[in-house]
Amino acid sequence: MDVAGRRISSAARRRLNDVMDAQRVSLGRTWRDVAARGGISYETLRAARNGSGDIPALTRAAMDRGLDWPAGTVDAILDGRVEKVAQAAVVRERQLDAAEERIVTATNQQFGEMLLEVMAVPTMTKPAIARWLVDALDMRDRYRAEQGGGIARGA
């Protein structure tokens, strides 16, 4: 149920996800960063963004914190009081930084070489390497899909 006690519509959930994604990208954060800053697990955040059920009040507050939003912003988006979907499209078109550009334009062979570089960093733990890999592949897939480049992992 949303803040008014109604079921969250799929349109409201899509709107929330779009606005959250725009804010996340503009802050230069991964979804894991957003979850950590908000004080919730990545799985809880993913379920809130993509699920079909209720988003508990504590989770909504954590989402606000993770995205540096004032308290109540997630509620306002779900209720339709805040509509920033047009802004989301503008933010997604921002210029990529050098590291992002390298990831999204890499061939599979170049991507493998980048992974070997990351694995060679002595302070990188196996879970951190796995997170980097998932986040990098997600970024590459999203970018290529937005550019009409098809399925990135098979490219």
Image: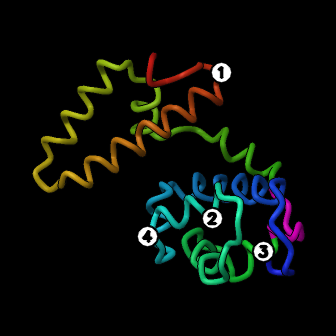
Residue 48's tag is 2
Query: Which of the two marks, 4 or 3, is nearer to us in this view?
Result: 3
Q: Residue at x 69, y 83 (%)?
A: 71
How many residues crowd mark 2 within 10 Å: few (<14), some (14–19), many (20+)?
many
Residue 148's tag is 1
Name the magenta segment's main secondary structure: loop
Query: Which of the two marks, 3 or 2, is nearer to us in this view?
Result: 3
Residue 79's tag is none
Q: Is residue 80 above or below residue 64?
A: above
Q: Are marks 1 and 4 in contact (CB under 8 Å)?
A: no
> Could you tell me how far apart the alpha carbons at marks 3 and 1 are, in whole angstroms?
36 Å
Residue 36's tag is 4
First along the sequence among labels 3 and 2: 3
First along the sequence among labels 1 and 4: 4
User: Magenta part of the protein: which range?
Assistant: 77-84
Amino acid under label 2? Ala
Q: Helix, strand, or loop for circle 4?
A: helix
Q: Residue 27 vs residue 117: left or right?
A: right
First along the sequence among labels 1 and 2: 2
Q: Which residue is mark 3?
A: 1
